Amino acid sequence: MIVLGIESSCDETGLAVYDSEKGLLAHVLHSQVEVHAEYGGVVPELASRDHIRYLLPLAEKVLDQAGICRHELDGIAYTAGPGLIGALMSGASVARSLAWALSIPAVEVHHMEGHLLAPLLEAGAPELPFVALLVSGGHTLLAQVEAIGSYEIIGQSLDDAAGEAFDKTAKMMGLGYPGGPVLAKLAETGRKDRFKFPRPMTDRPGLDFSFSGLKTFALNTWMQHRQATDDEDQLRADIACAFEDAVVDTLLIKCRRALQQVGCHRLIVAGGVGANQRLRQRLHQLGKKHRFSVNFPRFEFCTDNGAMIAFAGCLRLQAGQSQALDIDARARWPMENLSPVE
Ligand code: KG4
Ligand code: ZN
């Protein structure tokens, strides 16, 4: 089965072609970073307009790169939520129209399910069951995964998501948008021992997260030391380093706790913050020490992309799932409500 996947939930237009026999055939991505940069964050209306501009040319490009014509497609998968409603509607309308014109089924994909399944696109993907850590700009959660489509949330953020905390901390130090990758890069030149930030909610049982206090801690440190310093760049780097260390440590503690609680030895990590090098290294080390496997998506499939949507949609289409002609995009969509893929 050959499936075209369309992702347009936020500020990236991602399209991909996935073949259930041969794997991923092609993927293309257009990032809107330049459109939103001057506003310091995503402007929803500009996002929708930019998706509309790029969706069809990218659809042609990805089919071309995959070396197939549109009549060879067996189905179309599109992100139906959660995300920015106008952005979602743009992708959903193109997906539904193409499917209707080609007389093939179209299937809705939950954006976070797409992220969660992205590690399974790689060689050596783990078998079920496993524990998934999803760390993106909008969500931070731990899920117990017994089957594809069956996700029991065992821990989640009570306030800011990890990526959001990265972005806000970067912004308050004047590092622009999107802040996560910039802050992570800066952390490499930070001095490890200058500041020690708290590890929120690790001193009590449970698997929930809270990153908003950490962001405030970073802000207070910045305000306190900014006047007195003669090297603002080094101060930024030192704060970035302490902040990243605290987020990574907190995620590690909760992952290990989740695996112990569930009695599982397989962890997968997905979502934008999964691109963080320190998180990747430290989790691999922890896995070696405590004998659990850790799988990440390849670097470019941690953040939003069409490949994860094509793949997740293909699994659902193969199970006979698809939706009727009406377009039902949702800004909010709890992941626990998904139907299992049998
Ligand atoms: O999964 P994603 O592309 O979008 C959502 O579904 O939210 O994640 C984007 C988030 C942003 O908050 C971004 O700052 C963060 O992932 N991010 C990173 C890194 N790369 C992206 N955070 C920390 N370190 C990185 N290297
Ligand atoms: Zn995402």
Image (tube, helix red, strand yellow):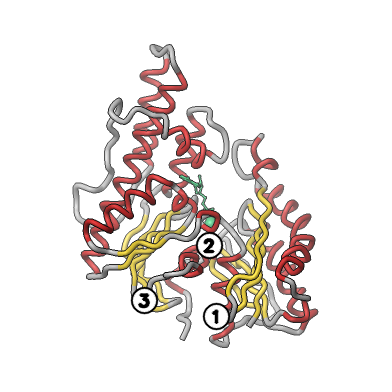
Q: Which residue lies most toward the left here?
A: 204
Three-letter amino acid code of the residue under disc 1: Arg
Asked whether the beta carbons under mark 1 and mark 3 sit within 8 Å of each other, the answer is no
The kind of secondary structure element at disc 1 is helix
Residue 282 percent across, percent down from the top left: 32, 49
Give the residue pinned by disc 1: 316
The kind of secondary structure element at disc 3 is loop
Q: Nearer the viewer, mark 1 or mark 3?
A: 3
Other-residue count near label 1 (Cα within 10 Å), few / some / many at <14 / 14–19 / ≥20:
many
Task: State which tag comes first along the sequence, 1 or 3.
Answer: 3
Q: Is residue 277 left or right of residue 92?
A: left
Q: Is residue 119 left or right of residue 313?
A: left
Q: Nearer the viewer, mark 3 or mark 2?
A: 3
Residue 260 percent across, percent down from the top left: 21, 64
Q: Is residue 124 left or right of residue 129?
A: right
Three-letter amino acid code of the residue under disc 3: Leu
Task: State which tag comes first along the sequence, 1 or 2.
Answer: 1
Q: Is residue 100 left or right of residue 117?
A: right
Per the rendering, the mark at residue 128 is 3
When the figure is inspected, residue 281 is found, relative to residue 218, above or below; the finding is below
CA gap between label 1 and label 3 equals 17 Å
Three-letter amino acid code of the residue under disc 2: Arg
320 or 296: which is nearer to us?
Answer: 296
Residue 230 percent across, percent down from the top left: 43, 12
Give the residue pinned by disc 2: 332
When the figure is inspected, residue 177 is found, relative to residue 274, above or below; the finding is above
Per the rendering, the mark at residue 49 is none
Q: Residue at x 54, y 86 (%)?
A: 319
